[in-house]
């Protein structure tokens, strides 16, 4: 008698010609001789799945599913056949097939299907006359503006994968079922089949479906009852609710073959009841076949909404296929927006944020039997609520693809400012995503960078009506915690900023509240780059600048500023680089140019700064690089100047400049030595300089040139052969007629 052993593990690294296999398989085949193992056989590109299936079947295996999406087949393979397949060069990978269990939650187990209990009902009529106790998810997900306008999912095709569905329950009398298929018993009956199914197997799927399409007057109203439904029974509940992953893959391809817009699966595959599980490190979006199939569905335009799982509160507990990049993975929160303790958290193994969104998943009213409703908990119920909201969006925007739809929901979700691995982007706002919610319109400023440091902020009332009061917030960060301004403005539709902005960037938004009680906000605007108060336009190149004038003219362009706090006044300072001391300073300038009234020392590096005043506020602006006043006259003495910068690298410079003067034409040597006197780099003589140099000044840049230094006399810390030298102290040695001199150079290394 054959024994079936179901295992799940991951493939090892690919061999050159043989298929990659799980290390569990060889160990298993050594221990057990009479075993049939269920595996996925991934074919190499170009290998026919039909031919592979026929060959595997002829060897005694039972082929379960062929997946053109995965280019693979799943099969029950005898151990002898499996040993041969381990050497098959047509196979790219062999991955054991797993049987999974439907995940549990912390408040009510879903492992054992329940039979409806007479009289058991925790959702009596009350509250809203139309929606009754099912009103809570509508409010939390902001679905009422859509449903009140008559949007009910018309024209949208939705597939639901679950344990079965009670298609004869009166709550679904008016619902259109386009197709149904039982992938467990391979027929077209998704209800419980007496003598085959465990009684109550259909209960979980029926509850999920009711949030889409159920109608129990005054007690429950499904969100998308006018959608067309494809019902797939994929979950085998007979053996502790384990389910084959190949059923899931087959159901996806079945739904695609009929035509489907949305797939909802309240199924989370992580912990298997046979002793093997996916580890968090394996949830990277590329391993589980259900995950890979979900991404394949998205490429075909299908939006897959799936449960994150109920394995929280630990991190990295999201289940497959929730790790799929394109899946909308849904966590659960309560009616106050708090995360449910059981809701699985992310991130994925490769660092992506999951879940994508959260939705009500605590005390949600669902149909559990004819005329019976219960309050249930789990990401199983947060998922269909989200998927049904997606159906209303697809009704309005039929061409919106899975990724664009996800991005639309993210833009309005409750945690969009700071998504994390607990809430993802938070609870969707479906009315806002559809453009039907109350909103304000931000008018200006919208374009980055700002053209002024005292902008006028303006907006209009959008869809808010009545008397509206406004609140303007400006902040340094997108979460509005580092606040620049937070002010109530009455009913004004604009605000003139009178305190100048400075810094890198700002974000702003306006909140409005009408006397009717309605409230709305503009979208967050930003980041908007704040410009510098002035841009230095002379002697400010980052690579350095050279001038032959000892009394240079400094110029700058100010940014726009309102009055008050403008107009600007300026303080100008010129600083000697070597000493850090100011050689010149003047305050209270009003023009945007200034010529020094006294000469600067030639052959000396300087930097200049501008202090800009706007009322009581100031901003300091430094030249981006140093500048040099060159001396065109012949030197009267031979000198070796101290290199700069020193130490180096420093201040964005990866090289140091070498300057020297030669008073008399003659033989010149310029070398870099280590502290032991060993030669490491020679500049003169060399490729750029002959051994005999005429009198002159060397190492400086030229006016109108590319910088303050001659690039031929810049040392980057390398030896003559180009290899980098270690950090340390080195010596610059100049030998010229009548002079031998050394200067210490400190190299910080690279």
Image (spheres, helix red, strand yellow):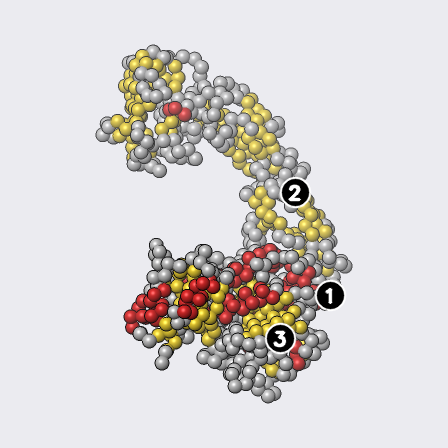
Q: Quadrant of the rendered structure where residue 558 is?
A: top right
Secondary structure found at label 3: helix
Instruction: Give the Cα separation between the discs numbered 2 and 1.
Output: 40 Å
Q: Position of residue 731 (x, y in %)?
A: 29, 27
Q: Residue at x 38, y 31 (%)?
A: 655
Looking at the image, is 258 positioned above or below residue 459?
A: below
Q: Position of residue 217 (x, y in %)?
A: 70, 78
**Observer-nearest residue: 302 or 721?**
302
What quarter of the picture does the C terminus occupy?
top left
Q: Nearer the viewer, mark 2 or mark 1?
A: 1
Q: Residue 341 shows which numbered tag?
A: none
Q: Residue 210 shows which numbered tag?
A: 3
Q: Residue at x 66, y 56 (%)?
A: 521
Q: Nearer the viewer, mark 3 or mark 1?
A: 3
Cβ atoms at labels 2 and 1 below 8 Å apart:
no
Q: In this view of the protein, can residue 312 be seen by the observer?
A: no
Cβ atoms at labels 2 and 3 below 8 Å apart:
no
Q: How many marks?
A: 3
What quarter of the picture does the N terminus occupy?
bottom left
Which residue has dot 2 on it?
455
């Amino acid at each position: 008698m054959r024994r079936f052993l179901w295992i799940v593990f991951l493939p090892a690294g690919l061999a050159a010609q043989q298929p990659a296999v799980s290390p569990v398989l060889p160990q298993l085949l050594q221990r057990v001789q009479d075993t049939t193992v269920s595996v996925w056989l991934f074919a190499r590109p170009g290998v026919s799945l039909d031919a592979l299936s026929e060959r595997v079947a002829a060897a005694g295996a039972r082929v379960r599913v062929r997946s053109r999406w995965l280019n693979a087949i799943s099969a029950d393979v005898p151990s002898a056949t499996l040993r041969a397949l381990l050497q098959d060069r047509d196979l790219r990978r062999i991955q054991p097939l797993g049987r999974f269990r439907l995940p549990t939650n912390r408040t009510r187990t879903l492992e054992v299907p329940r039979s409806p209990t007479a009289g058991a009902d925790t959702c009596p009529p009350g509250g809203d006359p139309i929606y009754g106790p099912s009103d809570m998810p509508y409010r939390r997900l902001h679905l009422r503006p859509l449903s009140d306008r008559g949007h009910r999912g018309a024209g949208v095709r939705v597939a639901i994968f679950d344990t079965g569905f009670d298609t004869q329950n009166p709550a679904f009398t008016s619902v259109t079922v386009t197709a149904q298929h039982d992938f467990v018993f391979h027929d077209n009956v998704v209800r419980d089949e007496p003598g085959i199914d465990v009684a109550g197997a259909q209960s979980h799927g029926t509850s999920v479906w009711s949030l889409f399409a159920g109608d129990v007057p005054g007690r429950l109203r499904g969100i998308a009852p006018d959608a067309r439904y494809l019902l797939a029974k994929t979950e085998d509940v007979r053996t502790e609710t384990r389910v084959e992953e190949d059923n899931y893959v087959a159901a996806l391809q079945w739904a695609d073959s009929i035509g489907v817009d949305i797939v909802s699966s309240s199924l989370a595959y992580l912990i298997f009841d046979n002793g093997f599980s996916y580890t968090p490190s394996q949830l990277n979006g590329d391993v589980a076949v259900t995950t890979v199939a979900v991404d394949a569905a998205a490429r075909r335009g299908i939006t897959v909404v799936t449960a994150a799982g109920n394995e929280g509160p630990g991190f990295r507990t999201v289940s497959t296929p929730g790790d799929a990049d394109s899946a909308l993975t849904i966590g659960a929160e309560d009616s106050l927006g708090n995360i449910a303790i059981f809701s699985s958290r992310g991130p994925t193994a490769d660092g992506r944020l999951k879940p994508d969104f959260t939705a009500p998943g605590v005390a949600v009213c669902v149909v559990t039997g004819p005329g019976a409703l219960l309050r249930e908990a789990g990401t199983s119920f947060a998922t269909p609520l989200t998927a049904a909201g997606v159906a209303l969006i697809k009704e309005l925007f039929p061409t919106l693809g899975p990724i664009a739809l996800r991005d639309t929901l993210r833009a309005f979700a409750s945690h969009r400012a700071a998504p994390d691995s607990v809430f993802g982007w938070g609870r969707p706002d479906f009315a806002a995503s559809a453009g039907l919610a109350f909103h304000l319109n931000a008018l200006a400023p919208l374009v980055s960078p700002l053209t002024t440091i005292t902008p006028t902020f303006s907006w209009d009332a959008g869809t808010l009506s009545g008397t509206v009061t406004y609140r303007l917030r400006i902040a340094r960060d997108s979460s509005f915690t580092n606040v620049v301004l937070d002010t109530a403005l009455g009913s004004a539709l604009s605000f003139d900023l009178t305190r100048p902005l400075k810094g890198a960037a700002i974000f702003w938004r306006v909140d409005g509240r009408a006397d009717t009680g309605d409230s709305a906000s503009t979208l967050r605007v930003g980041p908007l780059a704040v410009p510098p108060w002035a841009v230095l336009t002379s002697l400010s190149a980052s690579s350095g600048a050279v001038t032959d004038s000892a009394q240079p003219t400094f110029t700058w362009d100010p940014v726009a500023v309102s009055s008050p706090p403008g107009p600007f006044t300026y303080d100008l300072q010129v600083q000697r680089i070597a000493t850090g001391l100011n050689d010149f300073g003047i305050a209270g300038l009003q023009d945007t140019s200034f010529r020094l009234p006294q000469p600067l020392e030639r052959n000396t590096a300087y930097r200049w700064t501008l202090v800009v005043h706007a009322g009581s506020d100031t901003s300091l602006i430094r030249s981006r690089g140093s500048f040099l006043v060159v001396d065109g006259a012949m030197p009267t003495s031979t000198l070796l100047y101290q290199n700069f910068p020193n130490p180096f690298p420093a201040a964005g410079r990866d090289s140091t400049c070498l300057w020297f003067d030669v008073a008399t034409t003659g033989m010149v040597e310029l070398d870099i030595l280590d502290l032991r006197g060993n030669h490491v780099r020679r500049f003169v003589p060399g490729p750029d300089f002959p051994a005999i140099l005429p009198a002159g000044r060397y190492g400086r840049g030229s006016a109108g040139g590319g910088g303050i230094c001659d690039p031929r006399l810049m040392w980057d810390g390398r030896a003559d052969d180009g290899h980098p030298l270690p950090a340390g102290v080195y010596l610059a040695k100049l030998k010229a007629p009548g002079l031998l001199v050394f200067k210490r150079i400190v190299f910080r290394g690279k």
